[in-house]
């Protein structure tokens, strides 16, 4: 049982910033994060638009300040399962912390278990571009930097136990329940990315050289898996890279009629970063409208044009994969009024964002109201 002033659900940049602001006024704050590390999506980004500041340089000082703050407690690998309110309007929350199968107090983060583990699965922190071990530290700047065992894929060979000097591996750990009382709750549950498999005509998830913008983002960060930009199908350095904007946004046929508000600008940012990594590449952005609506955004858009990024106004109808892995984009060219085709080595789908589903259901009996797009009203 733990009493706090504020329960922050979600340990991404919004949750961390909220927690720090509140904790600095003297309030006791608890952050509950479902992932193995706090930092959310932002800790995985390269740079931010339109300033091109390093995303990790903004996030990591906040992550480490939150981790060390005397008024902040952090539960990772944990989910709020249920929230009710008593007659005094005090929230009562039940939190479940899943086992890491590693004793946090003993783990030094040495990664010897990771080296010894023989099983490799897709690395979700590199958006499946490469593999990771089943005994693993989530990523190099994770907080806490403590190993975890992905028990669903573990073959219980015991190699990690033998390798771990401090004896931190513990397969007997069970889920733990923590009851929280809080005067306020901040929902900072973030968003989920639109699943490209839901637009079959673009081949996302089917064609190896059609990637999502998050997969491209990971190829542009300092901790990137390949140390350059490669197309996943054959490891070739791409010369002709296409961006398809509004992939899963402003499209009622895929159930998301609204603008995600970030895809235009992150694509323009990535186009500029690609030209830093591959100066000879041709980058083409297929768009419906470029919504450069914020301070400095229009200038950032113009800067990309000056760097020779091509912008083609036209709806992409279909993408086909060719025998050599290249992609043929069929699009309606608004300027000429004709349907055209263009070949590219790599296609990036600028996927939109959707609300994290189901978070309202933890509240009982009364649930927070949602808008028609399932965001919290
Ligand atoms: S669990 Fe053991 S071997 Fe793995 S990182 Fe922690 S201390 Fe090192
Ligand atoms: S017991 Fe599981 S986590 Fe440990 S080394 Fe074997 S497969 Fe990897």
Image (cartoon, grey):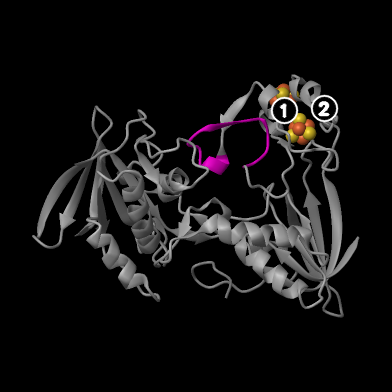
Question: Can you see residue 362?
Answer: yes
Bounds of the magenta segment: 124-139
Horizontal arrangement in the rendering, residue 1 relative to residue 346 (left or right):
right
Horizontal arrangement in the rendering, residue 166 relative to residue 297 (left or right):
right
Callout 1: CB less than 8 Å from ligand 1: yes
> Sequence-wise, which precedes: disc 2 or disc 1?
1
Residue at 82%, 31% in the rendered image: 171
> Residue 225: x percent and y percent?
49, 37
> Residue 253: x percent and y percent?
35, 58
> Residue 301: x percent and y percent?
30, 66
The N terminus appears in which quarter of the rendering? bottom right
Task: Tell me, yes or no, whether the highlighted magenta stretch contains residue 128.
Answer: yes
**Mark 2–mark 1 CB contact (< 8 Å):** yes
Q: Which residue does the numbered mark 1 point to in the structure image?
A: 112
Callout 2: CB less than 8 Å from ligand 1: yes
Residue at 68%, 71% in the rendered image: 18
Is residue 28 or residue 272 the one in the foreground?
Answer: 272
**Quadrant of the picture in which ligand 2 is shown:** top right
Residue projecting furthest to the bottom: 88
Q: Dot 2: few (<14), some (14–19), or many (≥20) neighbours within 10 Å? A: some
Element under disc 1: helix
Q: Which residue does the numbered mark 2 point to in the structure image?
A: 165
- Tell me: residue 44, above or below residue 109: below
Quarter location, residue 22:
bottom right
Horizontal arrangement in the rendering, residue 67 relative to residue 227 (left or right):
right
């Amino acid at each position: 049982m733990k009493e706090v002033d504020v329960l922050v659900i979600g340990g991404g940049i919004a949750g961390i910033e909220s927690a720090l602001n509140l904790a600095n006024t003297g309030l006791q704050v608890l952050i509950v994060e479902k992932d193995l590390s706090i930092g959310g999506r932002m800790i995985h980004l390269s740079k931010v638009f339109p300033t091109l500041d390093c995303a990790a340089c903004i996030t990591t000082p906040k992550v480490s300040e939150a981790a060390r703050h005397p008024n902040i407690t952090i539960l990772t690998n944990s989910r709020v399962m249920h929230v009710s309110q008593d007659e005094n309007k005090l929230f009562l929350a039940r939190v479940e912390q899943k086992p890491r199968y590693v004793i946090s107090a003993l783990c030094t983060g040495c990664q010897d278990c990771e080296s010894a583990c023989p099983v490799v699965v897709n690395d979700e922190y590199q958006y499946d571009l490469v593999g990771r071990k089943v005994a693993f530290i989530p990523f190099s700047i994770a907080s806490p930097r403590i190993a975890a065992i992905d028990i669903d894929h573990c073959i219980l060979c015991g190699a990690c136990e033998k390798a771990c000097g401090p004896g931190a591996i513990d397969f007997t750990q069970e889920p733990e329940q923590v009851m929280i009382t809080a005067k306020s709750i901040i929902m900072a549950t973030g968003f989920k990315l639109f699943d490209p498999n839901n637009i079959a005509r673009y081949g996302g998830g089917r064609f190896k050289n059609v990637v999502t913008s998050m997969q491209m983002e990971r190829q542009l960060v300092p901790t990137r898996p390949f140390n350059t930009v490669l197309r996943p199908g054959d490891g070739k350095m791409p010369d002709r890279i296409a961006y398809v904007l509004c992939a899963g946004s402003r499209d009622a046929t895929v159930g998301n009629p609204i603008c995600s508000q970030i895809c235009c600008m992150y694509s323009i940012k990535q186009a500029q970063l690609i030209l830093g990594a591959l100066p000879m590449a041709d980058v083409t952005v297929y768009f419906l409208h470029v919504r450069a609506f914020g301070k400095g955004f229009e200038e950032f858009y113009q800067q990309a044009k000056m760097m020779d990024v091509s912008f083609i106004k036209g709806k992409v109808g279909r993408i086909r994969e060719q025998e050599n892995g290249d992609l043929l984009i069929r699009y309606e060219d608004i300027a000429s009024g004709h349907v055209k085709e263009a070949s590219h080595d790599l296609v990036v789908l600028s996927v939109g964002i959707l609300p994290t589903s189901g978070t309202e259901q933890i509240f009982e009996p009364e649930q927070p109201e949602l808008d028609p797009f399932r965001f919290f009203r």
